[in-house]
Amino acid sequence: MMKAQGFSLAQLLGDSGIGREARVQADDHSAVRLWLRLLSCSTQIEQDIRARLRQQFGTTLPRFDYLAQLERQPEGLRMNLLSRYLMVTGGNVTGLTDQLVADGHVERLPDPQDKRSLIVRMTPAGRRHFMRMAMAHERWLADMLQDFDTLHKEQLYDLLGRLRVHLAHPPVSPTRAAQKKAAKDMT
């Protein structure tokens, strides 16, 4: 377990703050320890952001994420593509869309290229609402990480980028190669 200036992580965070990382044992595989550390950091930040969105804007993180996707695509998105970007089911997107249409933040439009599809686009009121939330969101993240050393932020950003590339294109291990060959031989 990590020590910072003579204190263990559990001592620094307390029982309620340690969360999933409390399960880590010294003899656990490094991949397990790394995964639990990443998950704990992500969960801690996400919980804080969820609470702030709820308290200050009366909204949820899924609604914020939905509007963030539309902000990046001012012409709008097909609902099935929005579902893929958000990594949720079409039913979830339909429910969020219904809510955001009722609030006046998005509109459904016929897709001129495919009469069976709808495009969802942010309204001007939705864009103003989202921009207020996005500015606050950025400020919250900056505040959370302001005392984390700049060099450490840059190194962590670089290392997580390398991890993303590795996970997207993992090398084929001898074990995995043998498994693939066995699966192919069975067909």
Image (spheres, helix red, strand yellow):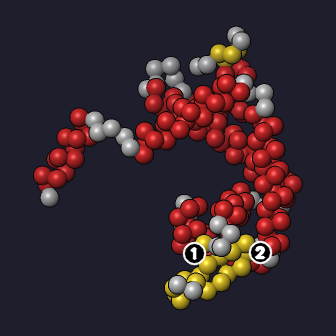
Q: Percent position (x, y) of residue 50?
A: 75, 51
Task: Evaluate whether residue 164 shows in this view.
Answer: yes
State the image coordinates of residue 95 (x, y, percent, origin top left).
Answer: 65, 73
* Residue 132 falls left or right of residue 74: right
Q: Amino acid at mark 2?
A: Thr
Disc 2 and disc 1 in contact, CB within 8 angstroms: no
Above-or-below relation of 148 to 94: above
The residue at the far bottom in this view is 115
Q: Earlier in the sequence, mark 2 or mark 1?
A: 1
Depth check, front residue: 79 or 157 = 157
Q: As drawn, which residue projects farthest toward the left?
A: 185
Q: Who's the residue at 84% across and 58% down the image?
A: 132
Residue 22 visible to an observer of this rendering: no
Task: Name the residue rendered at 65%, 25% in the picture.
Answer: 152
Q: From the viewer's perspective, tell me whether residue 40 is left or right of residue 182.
A: right
The residue that mark 1 highlights is 78
| Residue 86 in which image quadrant | bottom right
| Position of residue 86 in the picture relative to residue 123 (left or right) | left
Q: Secondary structure at mark 2?
A: loop
Q: Which amino acid, by three-letter code, is at mark 1?
A: Arg
Mark 1 residue crowding within 10 angstroms, few (<14) / some (14–19) / many (20+)? some
Residue 37: x, y in percent? Answer: 58, 32
